[in-house]
């Protein structure tokens, strides 16, 4: 690969934007937040982040923001990932290996179905709120 | 324990984020058989007493998670340096920031793998929040500098997966140029 300049990078970005008709950051409707504290990184959170990157590309999903945060406080369940999107409860998934990251993209984000066996926090409150309404 | 030196670096960068740094400087230099990794930030900094306690695995400031009883980031770094006869350094002052680094012999049999440095640099540049991140990569004869502000200007939002993929490709091209000389 030839060494790229910042202008090359800008041109590639513009081309990709045109190809994908990408929306800007304000229009992102899904947030994937990967816990990158010490315990998360030690458990493989960097590989999880890379797996999300590859899976989103594979499915051509452009409305997703891929964010990093510190520890989510569930050290026993690292790597942990929070997913926020419309029409779904905000969920913290645990033990998110690269394989599970793929399941989250396909099941939670694309089919709006929880990946039950990896849910570690949050959905109960949201579901209760919905039932009470 | 972290699987690679790249993981250790990413951990240090997130420590700087937690310290509310506005600017984070990273240096990854490999010369004369020594790998020098350093992260400098202008965050909250630590007193001398806190610096000593931060090297214990059974200390954490408890700010983010009050019930947590361990803090392993810096102890992992110290352990890595100790295991290969390297050097660990820590310089910090409240209100001024922190500089933490290690010098490691690259040919030591027990040195962890460097890991995917390009990916690690990209993730360090894309940490959430408005702050400048500057990464200086120094090779044997050449090197390159990555500035988040310049890259955001070229790519836009670095939390966009497409931007992040392009950023990784860009860093790989810089890295290959360093090693082709």
Image (cartoon, coloured by chain):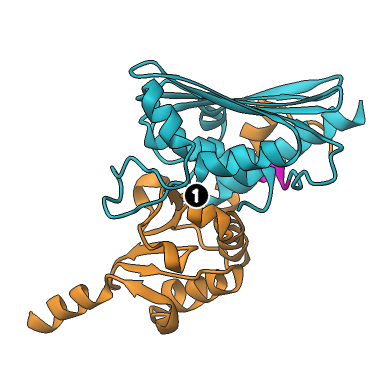
Per the rendered image, the range of residues in magenta is B115-119
x then y, percent, for residue B3: 67, 53
The residue at the point 63 percent across, 61 percent down is: A54
Chain to which the residue tagged by mark 1 belongs: A
Chain identifier of the orange chain: A
- Is A94 located above or below residue B80 in the figure? below
For the N terminus of chain A, give its image quadrant: top right
Residue B145's spot in the image, x, y percent? 66, 22
* Quarter of the figure that contains the C terminus of chain A: bottom left
Q: Residue furthest right?
A: B181
Residue B144 visible in rendering: yes
Mark 1 element type: helix
Quarter of the view holding residue A89: bottom left
The answer to whether residue B117 is magenta is: yes
Q: Viewed as shown, does residue B154 lie left or right of A35?
A: right
**Could you tell whether B101 is left or right of A28 in the image?**
right
Q: Residues within 10 Å of mark 1 (few under 14, many from 20)?
A: many
Is A63 in the magenta?
no
Q: Position of residue A93 (x, y in %)?
A: 41, 70
User: Which residue is rendered at x = 55% and y = 38% of the image?
Assistant: B124
Overall secondary structure of the magenta section = helix
Q: Nearer the viewer, residue A87 or B125?
A: B125
Residue B72 x %, y %: 49, 47
Residue B156 visible in the picture: no
Q: Is residue A124 above or below residue B165?
A: below
> Among the chains, which one is cyan?
B
Going by the image, does A66 lie left or right of B181?
A: left
Observer-nearest of B64 and B71 = B71
Q: Which residue is mark 1?
A: A38
């Amino acid at each position: 690969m030839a060494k790229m300049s910042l202008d090359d990078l800008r041109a590639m970005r513009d081309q990709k934007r045109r190809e994908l008709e990408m929306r800007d950051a304000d229009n992102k409707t899904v947030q994937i937040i990967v816990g990158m504290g010490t315990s998360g990184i030690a458990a493989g959170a960097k590989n999880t982040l890379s797996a999300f990157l590859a899976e989103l590309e594979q499915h051509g999903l452009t409305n997703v923001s891929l964010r990093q945060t510190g520890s989510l406080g569930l050290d026993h369940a690292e790597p942990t990932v929070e997913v926020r999107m419309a029409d779904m409860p905000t969920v913290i998934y645990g033990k998110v290996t690269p394989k599970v990251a793929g399941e989250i993209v396909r099941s939670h984000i694309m089919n709006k179905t929880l990946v039950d066996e990896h849910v570690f926090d949050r959905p109960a409150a949201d579901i209760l709120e919905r039932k009470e309404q | 324990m972290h699987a690679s030196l790249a993981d250790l670096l990413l951990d240090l960068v997130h420590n700087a984020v937690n310290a509310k740094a506005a600017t984070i400087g990273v240096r990854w230099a490999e010369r004369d058989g020594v790998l020098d990794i350093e992260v400098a930030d202008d965050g909250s900094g630590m007193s001398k007493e806190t610096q000593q306690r931060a090297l214990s695995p059974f200390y954490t400031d408890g700010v983010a998670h009050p019930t947590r009883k361990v803090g392993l980031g810096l102890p992992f770094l110290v352990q890595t340096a100790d295991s290969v006869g390297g050097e660990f350094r820590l310089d910090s002052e409240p209100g001024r920031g922190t500089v933490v680094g290690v010098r490691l012999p690259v040919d030591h049999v027990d040195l962890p793998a460097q890991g995917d440095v390009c990916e690690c640099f990209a993730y360090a540049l894309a940490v959430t929040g408005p702050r400048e991140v500057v990464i200086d990569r120094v090779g044997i004869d050449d090197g390159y500098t990555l500035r988040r502000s310049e890259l955001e200007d070229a790519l836009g939002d670095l939390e966009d997966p497409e931007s992040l993929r392009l950023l990784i490709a860009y860093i790989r091209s810089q890295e290959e140029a360093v090693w082709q000389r």
